[in-house]
Image (cartoon, grey):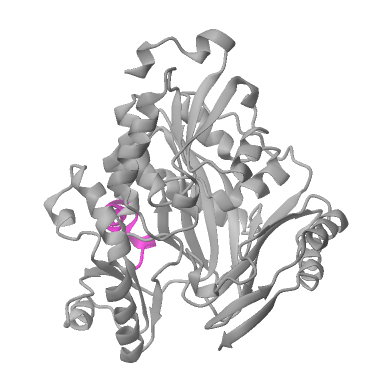
Amino acid sequence: MKSANVSSDARDGKRNVFVVGLNDFNRARLARLRGAEQCHFLGVIDPAEVYDTEIFPIEEMVERAGATLEAFDERIDAIVGYMDFPVSTMLPLLCERFHTRTTSLESLLKCEHKYWSRLLQREVIGNYIPRFTAFDPFDDDALATIGSAGLYFPFFIKPIKSSGSRLGFRIDQPEDFTSAIAQLREQIGSISAPFNFILDQADVPDEVRAVDGGFCMAEEIIGGWQCTVEGYVHEGRVEPYGIVDSLRYPHVLSFLCYHYPSTLPEPIQAKMRELTVTVLEHIGFDNAAFNVEFFWDEVQNRIWLLEINTRISQSHCDIFEKVDGVSHQQVTVDLALGRSPDMPHREGEFPVAGKFFYRVFFGDAVVSQVPSEEALAALCQDFPGTVIDLQVTAGQRLSSLPEQDSYSYALAYVWMGAADSETLAANYRRLADRLHFEFTDVTS
């Protein structure tokens, strides 16, 4: 095992931290972490394989990553990642093989397998989750199965395992279900096969194993003010450290902005932190970061747990850096190195920050023009601290973009900071008015 070899830790005092899918964008962020000068950040698996595709040959990826790590002739001190599937599910396999720290595969699946996670949540916080059932999208009687579980229109369906909002649908009538099922049957195999490979590596109860990656969930519609509790578990201690609001475009499911810190009433935030601690302790998740998504229905004053993710939200990295002084990648690296996270609080340049999603709501189109580098540089100069990351290139068809929701396409991500929420929103509107894209072959 590589840990028996002479390591760089002995030569130059630095630790070798491997990042699955490390790209230049994140390498720059990692270099600004506290203690970054004590680490070598090294990539494993090309970032294009996890960022720019929806095809995941995960068994082959795990083997290739293992071969890369096995060939490394120094000590491997940590293996980390910031992406959802397949990166999140690869980490326990790689960490176990190379004796580095993360949570167990079983505890990770208790969060990421949506049906298993709901069963466990129901045991300890049953009043805070929606009615749910699993169903087979290839079963022609699936709608009757859903109805027999007490779920009626409207409801929401999604795969047992997905990423982002991919293949998630609100079902208001039978025609919606028919349309969604057609898409699920066509596309679910791209994620069910790799996820089933992961399930085969784990000790899973028979009740859960019968509901594999080819199944879907139907859930009661929940809603309200959406937010995300970011946290970690270190040696059994659950520590929520920040809450981020998730604001949507009116009348659709597409995200407009992630806003930090949350503006929810403090008693609501406190209850969400309490629920987070309860469920993560029950699951047995340990020595890793997580985030838990909630809704607060203000009218009924009711909190709903939406889902648990087994990683930090990469979308939140820059807004934590702007407000707290460092990206919360700090948490992941520190935990992987066996340290209690050194995450600052409110030491950043801005009191509030947001990540905005610049979107179009087309059926499809071809991008014929994107903002020039000079135009983007001018915007970043006019709005200090702003980061703009284009998601499209000229000549690209929108339908080729990976990881989009079912209703829109994100053309650019924009991170901004400001003195207050009103100024933040106004600045984004001014910036968005100057982001110029053109399209051809547009379908509504």
Q: Is residue 119 visible?
A: no
Q: Position of residue 314 (x, y in %)?
A: 55, 49
Q: Locate residue 5: give its quadrant.
A: top left
Q: Is residue 322 visible?
A: yes
Q: Position of residue 135 (x, y in %)?
A: 22, 71
- Residue that extends furthest to the left in the rendered view of this protein: 206
For residue 370, side relative to residue 10 (left or right): right
Quadrant containing the C terminus in the rendered view: bottom right
* Magenta residues, dominant SS class: helix
Front-lying residue, 106 or 164: 164
Quadrant containing the N terminus in the rendered view: top left
Give the tally of numbered discs: 0
In the rendered structure, does residue 10 fall within the stretch colored magenta?
A: no
Q: Position of residue 124 (x, y in %)?
A: 31, 51
For residue 151, side relative to residue 35 (left or right): left
Front-lying residue, 407 or 170: 407
Q: Which residue is painted at 30% across and 68% down in the image?
A: 188
Front-lying residue, 389 or 32: 389
Q: Which residue is painted at 30% across and 42% down in the image?
A: 107
Front-lying residue, 162 or 269: 162
In the rendered structure, does residue 123 fall within the stretch colored magenta?
A: yes
- Residue that extends furthest to the front in the rendered view of this protein: 395
Q: Position of residue 161 (x, y in %)?
A: 32, 59
> What is the span of residues highlighted in magenta in the rendered image?
115-130
For residue 189, side relative to residue 358 (left or right): left
Q: Which residue is painted at 55% across and 70% down in the image?
A: 298
Q: Locate residue 179: give its quadrant.
A: bottom left
